[in-house]
Image (cartoon, rainbow, N blue to C red):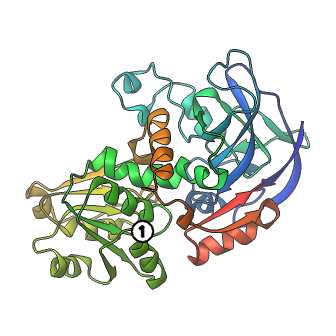
Amino acid sequence: MLMRAAVLTAFHAPMEIREVEIADPGPGEVRVQIKASGVCGSDLKAIDGKSPVVAKLPYILGHESSGVVESTGPGVTAVEPGDHVIIAMNGPCGRCRSCTAGRFHLCSDPGRLPTIMGGLPRIALSGEQVRRFIGIGSFAEYAVVPEPMCVKIAKSLPFDAMCLLACGVITGVGAVLNVAQVPPGAAVLVVGCGGVGLNVIQGAVLAGATTIIAADVADQKLKQAERLGATHTLLATDLPHQVADLVKGGVDYAFDATGAPGVLAQAFASTQPGGTTVMVGSPPAGHPMTLDTGLLFASRRLMGTQGGDSSPGRDLPMLAAQYVRGRLDLDALITERLPLDQLNEAVHHVRQGTVARTVITF
């Protein structure tokens, strides 16, 4: 079947809207008609040649998406044509050592790595394989994905809001609820108030944190953070001292949503003894970080997370329910909605930092 897709044919270059051939779904696969796809910072890293999972071009980027099941391959039982779904970034096998221990985000099924590295050959451009970002490639009219990556949602829910749950929301909220397990009454610092950081703030609100400090270098982002639940905002200069002026001794929990090693070190130094710091932002590979080991000796913890340590089948429906109840504001995250033809314009807006999330709609 022919479809339109945004194809990355060269790093540091605009994506091209091309007509490509997409295969029918194979055994255990689902073909989804994409209805909405968020533009994420991970997509920009791939464009810049800095993504560890994007090596050989051409590629179709996009991974934060929702849509309608168009067709299913043999053996698929969880969804059927016409179902509305969120496409999860991770489809755990449920059988490996990690999955049976409940660590679904670390699924070690042998088929997972090939999926992350571009997926099975399902799309072609002039006879050449086109790989798909994290095995999804949602900057296209359709995507073929493994059945476990399809999480069914109510048909009454809006596609543009639901697509955000797949990456930015589940990562940010999951870092609070699944990883740090922030208790009610805690003091929390969130550094970096982009698409992920804003959802860390929303996660802290859901957890019942009473002090939520948002820090960024852009005043516009801090205003959005305040609207979503931050009790204090800081234009970041010297975080440990700035935080100490607000919370004596430091915060209980700090979250770095920037992925910058130096910023992570500052967030760590902003916690009180016994405090926990979580690296939420995607870091550059191979970059070292310098820590004061005296701070670590005072029972402070430094943790990492991949996608909020989430279990898609459990967490995505929970987040959708929070949205329906008015406890999770997804609509406020969407700064603009653009068609596929304006994807490169959307990427430019994300680079400028003028949007929380841009959603490509179909």
- Residue placed furthest toward the top: 75
Label 1 Cα neighbours within 10 Å, binned few <14 / some 14-19 / many ≥20: some
Q: Residue 24: image x %, image y %? A: 82, 28
Q: Quadrant of residue 227?
A: bottom left
| Residue drawn at point x = 19 percent, y = 60 percent | 186
Left or right: 203 with respect to 67?
left
Closest to the observer, 190 or 56 = 190
Closest to the observer, 341 or 296 = 341
Asked if one can make out residue 57 in the rendered structure from this viewpoint, the answer is no
At label 1, which amino acid type do we have? Leu
**Residue denoted by label 1:** 228
Identify whether 20 is placed above or below 98: below
Helix, strand or loop status at disc 1: loop
Q: Quadrant of residue 39?
A: bottom right
Identify whether 247 is placed above or below 296: below
Q: Residue 10: image x %, image y %? A: 75, 60
Q: Quadrant of residue 251?
A: bottom left
